[in-house]
Image: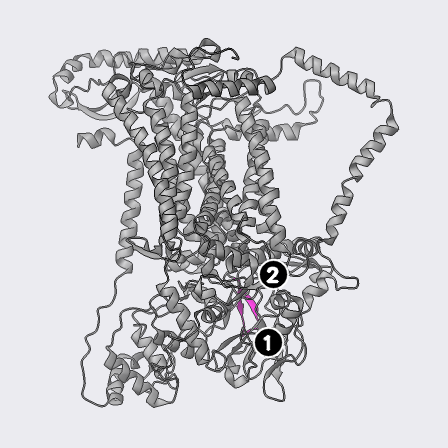
Amino acid sequence: MTEISTGPGTGAGEHAPAKLGYSPVADIPHRPRVADTDPKAARRAERQVSSMFMLSMLFVVLFIIAFVAIDKSANVYLPVFGVVGAMNITLGFTMGAAIFLIGAGAIQWAKKLMPDVEVVQERHDLSSPAEATGEAAANYERGKEESGFARFKIIRRTLIGAMVLFPIPLIVMLRDLWISPPGSPSPSELLTTTLWKDGTRVVTDPTYLPIRPEDIPVGGLVSAAPADLEEVQIAEGNLNARAKAAIILVRMDPADIVSQQGDGWDYQGIVAYSKICTHVGCPIALYEQRTHHLLCPCHQSTFDLADSGNVVFGPAARRMPQLPIGVDVEGFIVAKAPFAEPVGPSFWERG
Amino acid sequence: MSTTNPTVSSPIEAAGEGVATYVDQRVGSNKFLSRNLGKVFPDHWSFMLGEIALYSFIVVLLSGVYLTLFYKASMVEVIYDGSYVPLKGIEMSEAYSSSLDISFDVRGGLLIRQMHHWAALIFIAAIAVHMFRVFFTGAFRKPREFNWIIGVGLATLALAAGFSGYSLPDDLLSGTGLQIARGIVQSIPIVGTWGAFLLFGGEYPGTDFISRLYGIHILLVPGLILALVTVHLMLVWTQKHTQFPGPGRTNSNVVGYPLMPVYMAKAGGFFFIVFGVCTLIAGLVTLNPIWIFGPYTPDQVSAGSQPDWYIGWLDGALRIMPNIETYLFGYTISWNILIPAVIMPGIVFTALALYPFLEAWVTGDKREHHLLDRPRNNPTRTGIGVMAITFYGLLWIGGGNDIIATSFNLTINSITWFLRLTIFVLPPIAFVVTRRICLALQRRDRDKLLHGYETGRVLRLPHGEFIEVHEPINYKEMAVITSKTDITPLPAPVKVDADGVANPYYRLKSMRAKLSHFFYAENIAKPTAAEIEAAQHHVAHDAALEAPLHAYEDADELRNGHGGVLHHLGMADTNSKQFAERTEQ
Amino acid sequence: MKFLAARRRQPVVALAMLLFALVAVGGVYAAVGTVRPAEAAGAASSETQVEMGKQLYLEGCSSCHSLQAQGSTNGPTLIGVGAAAVDFQVATGRMPLAAPGVQAAAGPPQYNKEETAALAAYVSSLAPGPAIPNAEQVDFGSADVAEGGVLFRVNCQQCHQAAGQGGALTQGKYAPSLMNATPVQMYEAMITGPQSMPVFSDSTLPEEDKKAIIAYVDYLQNAADPGGLSLGRLGPVTEGLFLWTAVFGALIAVAIWVGIKAR
């Protein structure tokens, strides 16, 4: 490499055989690089490149040492970074440096020691020559004639029909992406029902403790679930029931309640609302106890829990469904009825 | 090529030649090599943006294969028993548990996970910036329309790859994203509800979705991306790369460096650079600390829940959309979700894919283009691009409005209202301003051709007048400026021809003429030969008048031997000569 | 100057000017934004605690909370809020209010420990309310961090963010970062529900659960970042910002270096 690069004014063009199809650009004056004219500079560049490759190898060795020696849970303090994992930062740095240096070396090699004369190559017409087009057309005609595609009308039409129909089974089979047993409720029925029914106890989430009204002070917030959720969750082996049944209980001064979705759906100022946003379904519990507003962190729909859970801001179109509550004979909070409207995001059949 | 080559010096080279011969006798590869080892590639930093995308994709593939060895795509609930203490004994899906194991118990696993994610973010960002370059320089024009469409397809697939991967760890943040995705699917009229049930195998969240997504993420989407990338590159290869205007560069040649060795070294080296940067960043900077978010459950959410940057604009659109829903004959149409999350992106990607054809139709342009446009020379296109970026940027702000609100003491409500208004106002303003700037730059180019450039050196004439020294532009700039092609807008069609026959396509054609007018009517024409000549006379006249000053100038010690003159004596001559040369080509 | 004059038309100059303007505007904004009221010098008193608290109250608080502490249009009633609320508000510097706004911001405390205790004693003497938690109540040493994490994710992160960095509420209100909160302050906040925050009573969130939550926040406050630089633990927004500035900037810088001809 050195042999070529140290010669003054060398360029690809000068050495390129004619059949490669390029030549030096005539009207760009070429300024030789330092490495082209000064053998010392050329050797320096050579050293730069080779030492980058050498360093790269060194970093691979360091990587292996780090991989073996560093405890994977060890932390290290570094200025700017703070306390960080020692393993990740060492492995990343050594491996990254090893790889980066190969690239930097190769580019430095190209820039300093390989020819830097721009060359020119002619473009060729992209469209095919007329005779090729003619030949293709003739072949097509011959094929059409020999197959009788034009003559056998009935074959042609049935073939088209068959081609249109054959993918249908592939689509039909997608039906059982959801295996619903015979007689199982329709999607819209499933989206409309939750575990809540008359008498379901309200329990704390995730500790499943029953709640008495006096447990919640004014301004208090409790994330809650139906008492049978744990059981159902284990029986079904999924979180589907939880995704629909999650609610929040908040207590406000009864005088603050402007309106509710039903008469007497609160219990002494305690109101229960679904936790699932009516926009696209994020769970919401950003409750501001002073304004009684509930804010969704995903798209910032804001609901007023003192006013029937109505939307006061943001993209949600429907109010937050309210769960009517009361207390049972033992004095624990229970639902008085199921949700009157579907919880969560809207859907076509919802009406 | 199969005969022994006298230049082969080492046994390794001899062996290499043996292999080349062996392969050639079976696949005829030397024919390809003979044609292509000398293939010329133009050199410009912006041509490497596509390379960044390609190389980061390779990094994503490599690191992704490694991750598949450890990741378990299962929603079965397990009790975590790894080494991250704050989650010990907690119930979670096997997907999340195995992602934690990759992060804490597999040595180097966190590095690979972060490398995979960082490289994916870089991949999509590089695609976006590469598209900007192609758009603003008009590289999508004939004959490269197919490759533009493939590029739009790749961008869409990259989003799908990113989103499906973001959801796999099954942490609380990604699960929130899936919940939103389900809400969006559910909003689609007629088929949405059923579609959501089929996709998730029943109710949300079910137990199927992670494993379904996994197949899509590691097989379907990357397979399609690989196929399209291959076609994309083959087309670049056969059509040859476009080039920026410059000395010696015409529409029918390529000026640059040959594949072997310079381009190979630079492109190959750049692969290692991108790979190295991905690795370094993955080692030094945390990305998506899933252990902080906790396992997914559909009844929890964190403040500041955001998607990765490339979905941010859609999330922003969802946030700023007013709450419109229609109830009709017992059915619900959720415009508040449909418009921002389905219709708007649909329109954006369709418009993106069709743009080359729209522009070609409007301008009636059927020529091949291998020389790139300077963005200023097509002010309307550039304006449209900046308008789109502004639109995107505003939605992006919407996607991070809560973080912006807390960081700058603003309210999310005011940011949302600001965006609801400016989303209609700012993009058109951006269009007009950009267009004006482009036209002003065109005027300056024209000025430079006629009068040279302003050097910023001011000279005081003996009679006290101050004058700025103009100098001729250099040959490179001359080549760049003169590359502009003047385009005449299409003429308005005739409504009724001489024989009284009404033009059946009058309305369409008249719209087309109007659009063409809109695109090109205000363009600043390149100076004509006559104008150059007039300027030449003027300059010659000035030069003659100023001739006595040159002596004065030369004597002026403060000038430090710059050699500039008021009007360089030879300038007019040089300019017109070069101009003539350019226009001949 | 000649050097500058000759280069004043280069595109890079415009860029530099823009950068300068941005930095200048940002600097002014930061300078104006960080002005804090000077710390009030506390004077010790030899009177009884309640009496001292009353004096401090009348001087510093009564203008908003009224002379009898039953509240006015400028401030809520303090009857029944208890010592915990006073200690939280005063010790975190939220009260006395530095400036009217949607929400009292934390800052340097205006009263020393003794004065704060006196104020608390005075307010709790008006009517019973939640007391300041004792050392045993906030001793989270034996609490289960993992359990605390679960409770934190159910009850706290919706406002304070998964990593406790805080988050936005409506109309400019915000949930503050928990990174500097002390165990006592966290406990007080949960039982008193300062400002927008709801109350988490001991019945629905027992003392043990509160300890677990405090243990988890304490973990977050001191946790290392296994993956490197944390980017503020703010999630995808700062990650995206870092990507588009630092990472992409670096890649483009290299791309430009590749294209520049060697000297």
Report the colour scheme: one colour
Element on which disc 2 rests: loop
Element on which disc 1 rests: loop
Is A140 above or below relative to A209? Answer: above
Label 2 neighbourhood size at 10 Å, few (<14), some (14-19), many (20+)?
some
Is A306 magenta? The answer is: yes
Residue hosting label 1: A260
Can I make out residue B245 in this image? yes
Alpha-carbon span between mark 2 and mark 1: 40 Å
Image quadrant holding the N terminus of chain A, namely top left
Is A266 on the left-hand or right-hand side of B330? left
Q: Chain of mark 2?
A: B
Disc 1 marks a residue whose amino acid type is Gln
Image coordinates for residue B215, horizontal then vertical, percent = 62, 47
Image coordinates for residue A236, horizontal then vertical, percent = 67, 67
Q: Chain of mark 1?
A: A
Q: Nearer the viewer, residue A301 or B67?
A: B67
Is B307 on the left-hand or right-hand side of B579? right
- Do the residues indicated by labels 2 and 1 lie within the same chain of the protein? no
Disc 2 marks a residue whose amino acid type is Val
Q: Are marks 2 and 1 in contact (CB under 8 Å)?
A: no
Q: Which residues are magenta?
A: A301-312
Image coordinates for residue B50, horizontal then vertical, percent = 47, 33
Q: Which mark is residue B76?
A: 2
Q: Nearer the viewer, residue A102 or B356?
A: A102
Q: Nearer the viewer, mark 2 or mark 1?
A: 2
The residue sitting at 59% across, 25% down in the picture is B492
Image coordinates for residue C251, horizontal then vertical, percent = 39, 38
Is A144 magenta? The answer is: no
Q: Which mark is residue C40?
A: none
> Residue C90's quadrant in the figure?
bottom left
